[in-house]
Image (spheres, rainbow, N blue to C red):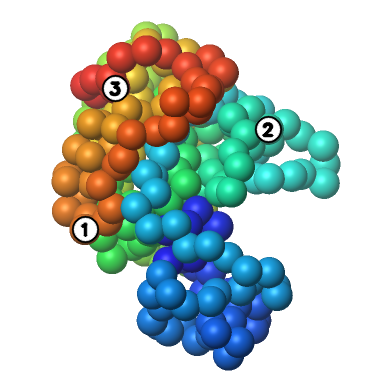
Amino acid sequence: MLAGAGLGSRREMEQWIAAGRVSVNGVPAAVGTRVSADDRVQVDGRPLRLRRGVAARVLLYHKPTGEIVSRDDPNGRPVVFDQLPRLRGAKWIAVGRLDFNTSGLLIFTTSGELANRMMHPRHGIEREYAVRVLGELNEEQMQTLRTGVPLEDGPAHLDSIVDAGGQGSNHWYNVVLSEGRNREVRRLFEALNLTVSRLMRVRFGPIALPSHLKRGQMRELEDAEIARLYETLEFQGQAAAPKAAAARAPRGASPGPARGRR
């Protein structure tokens, strides 16, 4: 319920509950405590109105290199959250991350349940990347990446790798994997002594980066698109409801639905 109210991801809400920040009818809450619309829920001593039926919002952002996926950075680097439209009574949750030097599709949502459904490893949601390397892989190297490579945090592999061509010393490959470990794609190629000169996420699950969405641009999904996303994920969440008429379009938003694979 807390995540559905847009306060954060399910993991964050579980941490809040474990830290004793949440109470139900004056009693400290536990993970799994059931609540209804008649219950009195407080967070840090402040009453919370649980908003049943509130529409999830989903935002697509074409992240350029040189931005960090964080709400703030002690080194003063640009952060992606500074680019997003402001919200009242909710906050944007990043569905996965991209490295400082990685560009491409970032998805943000106000629904912690939806974010958890897309990110949790047990659901095996695919991530697709366009990878540019120095030199061309031979078939043995490609098969090794499919079979598995030992990394410091355990073995990893690509679900698929397809030669996408290239010119000169640079060669492109489209790769798909179903994990979201830190720098996983780069580390897989580096394990074979291959230098990744550019990395771009072009798809996350059923959502592809729209070809018209330029670096630094964003657009919000329409209600029908969000409904299809829920259906595709087989997620029994709240159906998207019409947005308030006063909701303004995000800066840099592009009209029209997301189509196809980049």
Identity of the amino acid at label 1?
A: Gln
From mark 3 to mark 2, how far is it between C-alphas? 23 Å
Residue 256 in sight in this render: yes
- The front one of 186 and 169 is 186
Element on which disc 2 rests? helix
Residue on which disc 1 sits: 236
* Amino acid type of the residue tagged 2 in the rendering: Asp
Using a 10 Å C-alpha cutoff, classify the residue at mark 2 as few (fewer than 14 neighbours), some (14 to 19) or many (20 or more).
Answer: few
Q: Are marks 3 and 2 in contact (CB under 8 Å)?
A: no
The residue tagged 3 is: 258
Place of residue 262 in the rendered image (x, y in percent of width and height, measured from the top left) = 29, 20
Of 144 and 33, the residue lying toward us: 33
Q: Residue at x 64, y 83 (%)?
A: 20
Quadrant in the rendering for residue 100:
top right
Q: Earlier in the sequence, mark 3 or mark 2?
A: 2
Q: Nearer the viewer, mark 1 or mark 2?
A: 1
